[in-house]
Image: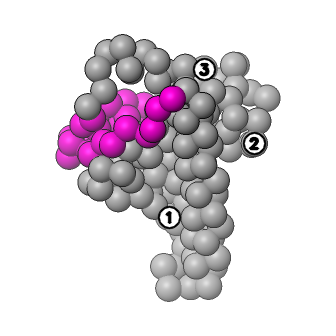
């Protein structure tokens, strides 16, 4: 498997190609945020606020670098939500690398956006770690 390369790595930031690609990614981010909101809401939750700790880790563990107020019970409950979101994204053809791309548009130091970033990273890593379950 090739290494992950961010969506804009080979784009000139001032170009029309860059602006077009970013608009498309922003629209997909809104869709994924809607998916995240939906699965949290049907489970009686809202997306937990989270703020990045500033620590850097392997991308597979990046979701654990966010500070949040969830207890162990809530985290276990949220794992089922993460799996549902991952399944939904897989059905929509959204792969883990695209989820990584979406996080690049978020301010991980803002608690609201950081909350989405943490969930998106957890979903990306769920898909990546369990390819057979999500290879639809």
Q: Residue at x 59, y 24 (%)?
A: 83
Q: Quadrant of the C terminus?
A: top right
Task: Say which residue label 2 marks.
Answer: 92
Mark 3 and mark 2: span between their CA atoms? 17 Å
Is residue 134 depicted above or below 28 in this figure? above
- Of all residues, the one furthest to the front in this rendering is 44
Residue 41, x across and y down, in percent: 55, 36
Dot 3 lies on which element?
loop
Task: Say which residue label 3 marks.
Answer: 130
Specify whether residue 24 is painted magenta. no
Is residue 43 shown left or right of residue 57? right
Task: Say which residue label 1 marks.
Answer: 9
- Of all residues, the one furthest to the right in this rendering is 136
Is residue 84 depicted above or below 113 in this figure? above
Q: Which residues are magenta?
A: 44-68
Residue 40, x across and y down, in percent: 53, 34
Dot label at residue 55: none
């Amino acid at each position: 498997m090739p290494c992950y390369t961010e969506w804009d790595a080979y784009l000139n930031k001032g170009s029309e190609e860059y602006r077009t690609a970013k608009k498309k990614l922003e629209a997909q981010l809104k869709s994924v945020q809607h998916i995240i909101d939906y699965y949290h809401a049907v489970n009686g939750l809202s997306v937990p606020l989270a703020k990045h700790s500033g620590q850097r880790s392997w991308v597979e563990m990046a979701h654990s670098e966010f500070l949040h107020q969830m207890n162990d019970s809530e985290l276990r409950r949220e794992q089922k939500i993460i799996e549902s979101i991952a399944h939904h994204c897989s059905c929509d053809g959204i792969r883990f690398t695209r989820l990584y791309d979406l996080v690049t548009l978020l301010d991980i130091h803002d608690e609201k956006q950081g909350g989405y970033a943490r969930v998106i990273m957890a979903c990306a890593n769920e898909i990546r770690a369990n390819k057979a379950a999500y290879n639809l």
